[in-house]
Amino acid sequence: MSFAVNPPPAVRSFPFSRSPIGRTPRVSMVVRSGAGVPIATAAALPILTKLQNDCATPLPVLRHVADAMATDMRAGLAVDGGSDLKMILSYVDSLPTGNERGLFYALDLGGTNFRVLRTQLGGKDDRVIATECDQVSIPQDLMFGTSEELFDFIASALAKFAQKEGGKFVLPDGRSRETGFTFSFPVKQTSIDSGILIKWTKGFAVSGTPGKDVVACLNEAMKRQGLDMRVSALVNDTVATLAGARYWDNDVMVAVILGTGTNACYVESVDAIPKLNGQKTTSGRTIVNTEWGAFSNGLPLTEFDREMDAESINPGEQLFEKTISGMYLGEIVRRILVRMAESGSLFGKHVPERLRTPFTLGTPNISSMQQDTSEDLEAVGSILYEATGVDSNLDARKMVVEVCDTIAKRGGRLAGAGIVGILQKMEEDSKGIVFRKRTVVAMDGGLYEHHPQYRRYLKDAVTELLGPELSNNVVIEHSKDGSGIGAALLAATNSIYEH
Ligand code: ADP
Ligand code: MG
């Protein structure tokens, strides 16, 4: 059985001595200007200075973002289409309690990988008896193929996984398997087990799905594969993360994903949702999926962001996501480095084609370069060479690290401001609900998990905005892979069988 494994940070994974002969990064000759600053780096310096100004997130900018997030949330709750934020109703009205029992599956489609999981739940005493999971990467061509091709691929992976069920996993006679379906793209939910895809994001452009019920697409594909399983809960990854974290901790009120893309959800009172037109839930609460990736108000954007956006498959959309999430941070840095290479000769006269190729520099590369504490920034040099083909001297590497830090800092701090916006909105509507007691924000996603500087910038921004006293009550906690178990738990709470 394989398990979800994120690649460890690549720090020092390309030591010079292990590079094949002839491919060893060369440290170029440095010509110094009168002031002692190398000429190449000196020419790139104004670009860095302007970048740092354009990306700055002082307290007033953070405050504006937090306030605008709260305002946009309200507008989206008032009426569909009322704001950049869709504020989608999740139909998850009751969260796991710990009493869930039985065998449940979960599948997660949300980005680069597709995950399947099964869990045997044993109620309050035994909790999670056993869990198994598997991960399959999605072939690039399926991201641009047809709806049937994609869903057939998913259903066949799921069928293979279900065939290996055994041991502690027991399905009572006469029952169909039930699964939670975590689908991390904007969906207009029509019930807990149906939802229409609004649009693909995060680089997916599968034809034929927008406008269709994704549960029906999956159910049909499972039937074609001869798999006896039904989807009992369609959930977003943030909603699943919230449910998974809440199973262990009653104070979880918000969940945020920072991975390939980004999104956030929270527990809302039904009275604060005018677009529900007075519909009630038994708990009086429901989880709202903000789709905050579409937020755009007052973001400190640069020409590099605008160019990347213009060339993206969804220009003008998902601007918050494009500023703070893992799919884009490396690409923004690459674009800045191209400019520094072209007009500042940062890497000498020649600009390798690979540096000019979109998405050659990934966010994991950015994170790894920021972890390099060696005197000559050896890992930075190796990563740059391996990923983009550039030769760099020490001064160029220092410049590159500055660029990485600028983009990671802006992303982390804006994400923090977004979180405060949500907390602020909740608190303004029901005084004391978040700031006068312990409140947990469950975080997940590869970017949050593997990028320590980003994480620190995020937390710093939250503390700066809330002040020391209030921020003491706000716990920002990593809920690792909570979404898998969360989706299975929501399949359990929404099971068609007695529970
Ligand atoms: P997904 O969002 O695709 O469901 P994950 O939550 O695992 O999957 O996030 C994967 C994303 O996390 C990658 O696309 C990448 O942007 C980011 N990531 C992965 N590893 C690192 C790392 N070491 N440093 C920074 N970001 C990373
Ligand atoms: Mg994910």
Image (cartoon, rainbow, N blue to C red):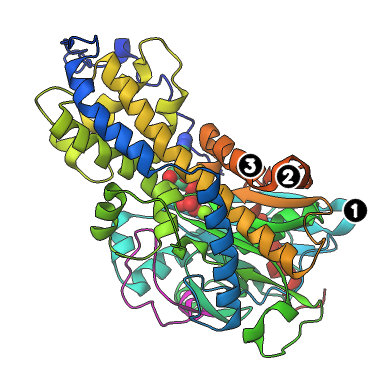
Q: Which residue sits at x=28%, y=63%?
A: 313
Q: Which residue sits at x=58%, y=48%?
A: 416
Instruction: Please state which amino acid type lies under the numbered disc 2.
Output: Ser
| Residue, disc 2 | 471
Residue 118 in view of the camera: no
* Residue 121 placement: quadrant: bottom right
Q: CA distance from mark 2 to mark 3?
A: 9 Å
Closer to the N terminus: mark 2 or mark 3?
Answer: 3
What's drawn in magenta, residue-wise? 195-218
Instruction: Please state which amino acid type lies under the numbered disc 3.
Output: Glu
Q: Which residue sits at x=43%, y=41%?
A: 56
Taking depth in this image into account, of 315 and 222 the one nearest to the observer is 315
| Residue, disc 1 | 125
Closer to the N terminus: mark 1 or mark 2?
Answer: 1
Q: Position of residue 236 (x, y in %)?
A: 57, 66
Instruction: Please state which amino acid type lies under the numbered disc 1.
Output: Asp
Q: Position of residue 63 (x, y in %)?
A: 57, 53
- Is residue 177 rendered to the left or right of residue 65? right
Q: Which residue sits at x=50%, y=80%?
A: 82
Q: Secondary structure at mark 3?
A: helix
Q: CA distance from mark 1 to mark 2?
A: 33 Å
